[in-house]
Amino acid sequence: MPGFVSKDVIDRIRDGIDIADYIGGVIPLKKAGSAYVACCPFHKEKTPSFHVNPARQSFHCFGCHEGGDIFKFVMLYDGVDFPGALRMLAPRAGVALEYEDGGAPGGGRPRAPGEPTKDDLFAANADAAARYQRELAESKTPGAEAARAYLLGRSIGPDLWREWTIGYAPDDWHFLSSDPSRNRRLDAAGLLSTSEKGATYDRFRDRVMFTIRDELGRPVGFSGRLLKPDERGAGKYVNTSETAVFRKSRILFALDKARRPMQEKRQALLVEGQIDCIRCHAAGFANAVASQGTAFTDQHARLLRRYADHVLIVLDADTAGHKAALRTAGLLLDEGLAVSLASLPPGEDPDSLILKQGPDAFAAVLAAACSPMKFLLDGMSGQLDPTTQAGLMQALKPVIELATHTRSTAQAELMMREASAALGVGVPSLMKDLEAARRRKYRAQAASSDAPSATAPDPATVQLPPIPEIPAEPPPEEYDLATLLCNDSSPELAGFVRQWLRYPLITHPACRPIITALAEEENLLSAIDDEPDACKTLAARISNSGSRIAGKEDITTPDRAVRDLLLRIWQGHLVRRQRDITRLLRAPSTPAPERTALLTEYNLLAKDLIHLRRGWPSAEPVLTRLLDQMDSSI
């Protein structure tokens, strides 16, 4: 397969690093005969059961039974997949990654000449960060003086500039883009903009620059803070535009620094901005992260779930911050995390509170954090009167809605007890309302999928379906798509799948989270950590096998292969809907008006299938319409 690292290169990387020396740089090792021992970094223990054998170049824990070579250790410790471990270890071993058959770094298909790779984007960002940092520290221009004065006025001094790679982008249209030979890479990294006339210029000018890194510490982008009002109405903060390595919905500021402290405490501290986050770390709260000036997303929640069981939210104390905190809490509850919310004093944020009153005052705020339900009820206090019927009904709606995000029955009952004490309504009544709301929510989700429904059932009679047994094998087109995504990790291919596929169309429950993780360019092992064993077994098979489409004479490129697989998945979806309609038409209970609508839908499906079977050019308009319909129903 193109894009694979040869076994010889892998062996040279493995042999080029002493495993005891590498692990000893991460955790303290103690000599024990010919081996080394330590407390296991993968589970809590008091007596060392983690052994490193330099002769065999392996490690093994007799407590949790994890073990393997240096690649396995990096995959477990740093939460990366095998290609990620290769990229991390190759420089340490002094081995250049060489890809068979002209493959691209990262396992992607061969790239066009001069097309930037992800490693090129990391390098471009690293070079820009260094130049911005030198400009802040050394430049004598008025702009740099103003940047230093701004940071020092915020009690952010040179030590923090160096630790967090803070810099200054001068008021220069071509500070980075003065060398045209580098502009293609800079543009791909989101560091340049283009005027209406086609002229290229620097995206960031006269701004304090905060370097944004991914969870492995690689520079993926920047957040630039404007120093003076802009007559054109430019935003106070501007982030790097979306690139192959920077997607705001998946990046959390300071995760590279907070990852290990979060894993040790199993708790994450979520704050609102970069300076708040930096201040928390400087004050000893090393598990703090922040979203990138955008709404917290479900992908952020899944990212935190890899490292923590409990998330402590500290957002601004105003009305907008209150709403954002509850929305964020709902997303975290959806992922099965425990959530607490801390209320800051009016007019304060973590940065100002720590500077004015010290870390102990902020620690006291965190210690007083409350549950999401209490936070909601406290926010409604004084605004609604639950002793009146109208006030009670207004209060019940957000209370029940918040509780629908819980996965655990015990957690839901605890919420209902809190609500019962505040609203004066019995817990059994609230639990009944919650169950009804969950049924309505389930029905709405089912309606947005391909599950048919002849008539809308009474919510009180709807029963949640039992968890079905996972079929042994996924459909061939789903398995092949997962394998193709795994073997070809290019962002273009993943983006194409994200554009033309919706994950509910994947019918196999173990294959769906695998395709979702690969298409979203997530770390596969971490993304499926909470999935059933059947999913993990399938992922291992996919990761260790070549694509079954390789070598087929009728599919010569990944581009053509992915189009073919997506068309087959969509065809299966439409055929299943036709079968559902046929069953409904045969049912005596289906009313006549609905039969007419079903027949119309059936005929449209038949026409759509003809277009899908003709190939991609004919299918693309049909898929665009179907996707619009599916997205508008969610």
Image (cartoon, grey):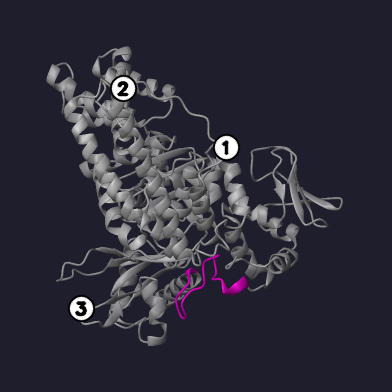
- On residue 434, the disc is 2
Q: How far apart are marks 2 and 3 (CA)?
A: 54 Å
Tell me the CA gap for discs 1 and 2: 35 Å
Q: In this view, does 334 lie above or below 488?
A: above
Query: Which residues are drawn in magenta?
Result: 98-118
Helix, strand or loop at mark 2: helix
Secondary element under disc 3, as helix, strand or loop, is: loop
Is residue 85 at least partly visible in the picture?
yes
Circle 3 residue? 196
Foreground residue, 405 or 166? Answer: 405
Task: Indicate whether residue 163 is drawn in magenta.
Answer: no
The local crowd at label 2, few if under 14, some if 14 to 19, many if 20 or more residues have their Cα within 10 Å, is: many
Q: Can you tell which mark lies on residue 472?
A: 1
Q: Which of 592 and 286 is in front in this view?
A: 592
Amino acid found under the numbered disc labelled 2: Leu
Of 321 and 405, nearer the camera is 405
The residue mark sitting in front, 1 or 2, is 1
Q: How many labels does the image show?
A: 3
